[in-house]
Amino acid sequence: MNLLRGRLQRLTQQLPSLIDQLPDESLTDAWKILEPLYYDLYMLAAMQESMRRIGPGDALTREEAIRLLNLP
């Protein structure tokens, strides 16, 4: 894992200069490929944050949520 971590860190250091060199058409293609990863990482960070913040009793059970939705 440390090898992969090092590779990713080197890549992210080089990305700004590489992105500046790409033509607009290539940026669009690159974004189409990277967009799912971007949103996956965003959701992963949000889930980790919610797991850190939510304690016992802070969330509704399925039955409680359905009851609240069905209120007149």
Image: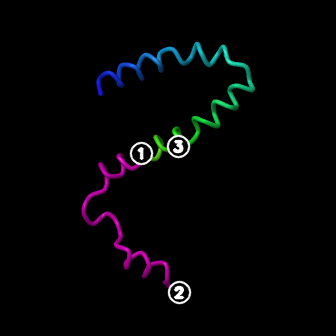
- 14 or 62: nearer the eye? 14
Q: Earlier in the sequence, mark 2 or mark 1?
A: 1
Q: Nearer the viewer, residue 9 or 55?
A: 9
Circle 3 crowding by C-alpha within 10 Å: few under 14, some 14–19, many from 20: few
Identify the secondary structure beneath mark 2: loop
Q: Amino acid at mark 3?
A: Tyr
Kind of residue sitting beneath label 2: Pro
Q: Are the two marked residues, 2 and 1, in contact with CB atoms closer than 8 angstroms?
A: no
Residue drawn at the location 51% of the way across and 39% of the way down: 37
Do the CB atoms of the residues marked 3 and 2 lie less than 8 Å apart?
no
What residue does disc 2 label?
72
Q: CA distance from mark 2 to mark 1?
A: 36 Å
Q: Mark 1 belongs to which amino acid?
A: Leu
Q: How far apart are the two marked residues, 1 and 3, measured between alpha carbons?
A: 8 Å
In the picture, the disc for residue 39 is 3
Q: Quadrant of residue 4?
A: top left
Residue 9: in magenta span: no
Mark number, residue 44: 1
Identify the mark nearer the N-term, 3 or 2.
3
Residue drawn at (58%, 13%) of the image:
17
Kind of element beneath mark 3? helix
